[in-house]
Image (tube, rainbow, N blue to C red):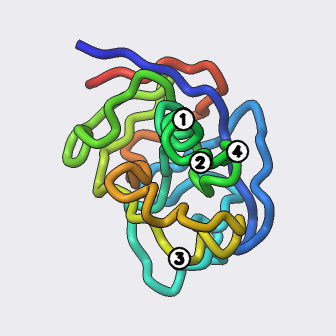
Amino acid sequence: MWEGKILSLHSCAGKEQPLQSPDQLACQAGVGIEGDRYALGTGTYSEQPEEGRQFTLFETETLEALARDFNIQLKPEQTRRNAITQGVPLNHLVGRKFKVGPDVVLEGMRLSVPCQYLEDLVEIKSLFKALINRSGLNCRILTGGTVSKGDLIRPV
């Protein structure tokens, strides 16, 4: 059995805005993160609604691999994901439920797909190819509550 944790949290109110890094995020079941671009309908892909964009995660292990294998220095907030995790097997959580902190339950909906938009936004060439099969996990929020930096993540 695995157990991981949240290293950092990120959110912003609109597309192309820099992500802020608060210590906590308020999660609303079936809606998203309070004040986040996808809960507000102001995200880049909001015109293509998808409940899997309610909460997104990215592995710190991928950030380390990008630096080691591709000499790409990507900051956690540049991933455009809501949480950076450590010790969480994101690619194996599609279709599975897991708990973040004391209250929030997420369900992995699909793996995130790298996009040219991200490469253009952060101006890092070859990022698209480097993120194939390791671009994070898109989730829906089943049980709302507050997620905090340092919270544990574990299977339900």
| Residue at x-position 75% and y-position 55% | 19
State the CA–CA distance, disc 1 to disc 3: 22 Å
Q: Looking at this rendering, what residue extends furthest in the bottom direction?
A: 47
* Location of mark 2 (residue): 82
Residue 8: image quadrant is top right
* Location of mark 4 (residue): 75
Q: Amino acid at mark 2?
A: Asn
Q: Is residue 47 visible?
A: yes
Q: Amino acid at mark 3?
A: Gln
Single out the mark in the foreground, 1 or 4: 1
Single out the mark in the foreground, 1 or 3: 1
Single out the mark in the foreground, 2 or 3: 3
Nearer to me, 122 or 111: 122
Counting from the top left corner in percent of width and height, residue 25 is at 66, 40
Counting from the top left corner in percent of width and height, residue 68 is at 54, 35
Indicate the secondary structure of the residue bearing disc 1: helix
**Labels 2 & 4 near each other (Cβ < 8 A):** no
Indicate the secondary structure of the residue bearing disc 2: loop
Label of residue 116 in the image: 3
State the CA–CA distance, disc 4 to disc 3: 17 Å
* Location of mark 1 (residue): 68
Label of residue 15 in the image: none
Indicate the secondary structure of the residue bearing disc 3: helix
